[in-house]
Image: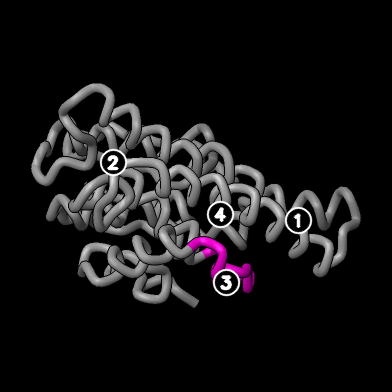
Amino acid sequence: MKLYTYFRSSAAFRVRIALNLKGLSYEPVFVHLAKGEHRNADYARVNAQALVPTLELDDGTRLNQSLAIIEYLDEVHRKPALLPDEGKARARVRSLSDLVACEIHPLNNLRVLQHLKRALGQNEDQVNAWYRHWIADGLTKFEAELASGKKGQFCYGDSPTMADCCLVPQIFNAKRYSCELAPYPITMRVFEQCMKLDAFDRAQPAKQPDAE
């Protein structure tokens, strides 16, 4: 398999974690988002959405959107499971995953931050304030969900799930922007537990060959 990836992309980071948890090897193909390589014609032929990640399977099939890729991997390579078997439990893990991937991340991804600067004339301090606002909004909700849900070492129970694959990259981004994380003790406990695992540690941005 090939994974079209960028070291700082939290969506690609999620998929790197999932591949590592599944013990699946892949060839990384680096797409430099900050240099706009995802908008090149060559990459458009790989992924019409002009986003990373893209996972190219051995038969040439290309999959995109991180949660869809992770769910595919979980269906084809079931162990260790990243989604529980029982329907309500699966919905719970998907809900936590979506809270990060569909509520927090889209407001703070690279193209949104660039638009704030280039089109709307926001300076660096204003952009950082925007970022921190939405991190605080999202993580407050995430913390409340963990406090009221099934207890365990991870987001759902005592083994990593897709929700953990989503949470860890978001915390890395929050740290990069010096967000205040003390108000989220359960969330941070889960993050620290995840980072004890090699699958999460190897996937982090600083350990990618394209890291700058």
Could you say where residue 149 lies in the image, as x and y percent from the top left? 36, 41
Q: Nearer the viewer, mark 4 or mark 1?
A: 1
Q: Which sits earlier in the primary sequence, circle 1 or circle 2?
A: 2
Q: Earlier in the sequence, mark 3 or mark 2?
A: 2
Mark positioned earlier in the residue sequence (4 or 1): 4
- Residue lying furthest top in this view? 87
Residue identifier under label 1: 130
Tell which circle, 4 or 2, labels the residue nearer the N-terminal end: 4
Asked if the residue under mark 3 is in contact with the one under mark 1, i.e. CB atoms within 8 Å, the reply is no
Tell me what residue is drawn at x 33 percent, y 27 percent. Answer: 91
Q: Which residue is disc 4 drawn over?
A: 37
177 in magenta: yes
Q: Which residue is mark 3?
A: 176
The amino acid beneath tag 4 is Glu
- Give the SS element for disc 4: helix
Comparing marks 4 and 3, which lies closer to the viewer? 3
- N-terminal of the pair, mark 4 or mark 3, is 4
The amino acid at mark 1 is Trp
| Numbered disc 3: secondary structure | helix
Whole-angstrom CA distance, mark 1 to mark 2, is 35 Å
Front residue of 111 and 184: 184
Which residues make up the magenta segment? 173-184
C-alpha span from label 3 to label 2: 30 Å
- The amino acid marked with disc number 3 is Arg
Does residue 56 show up?
yes
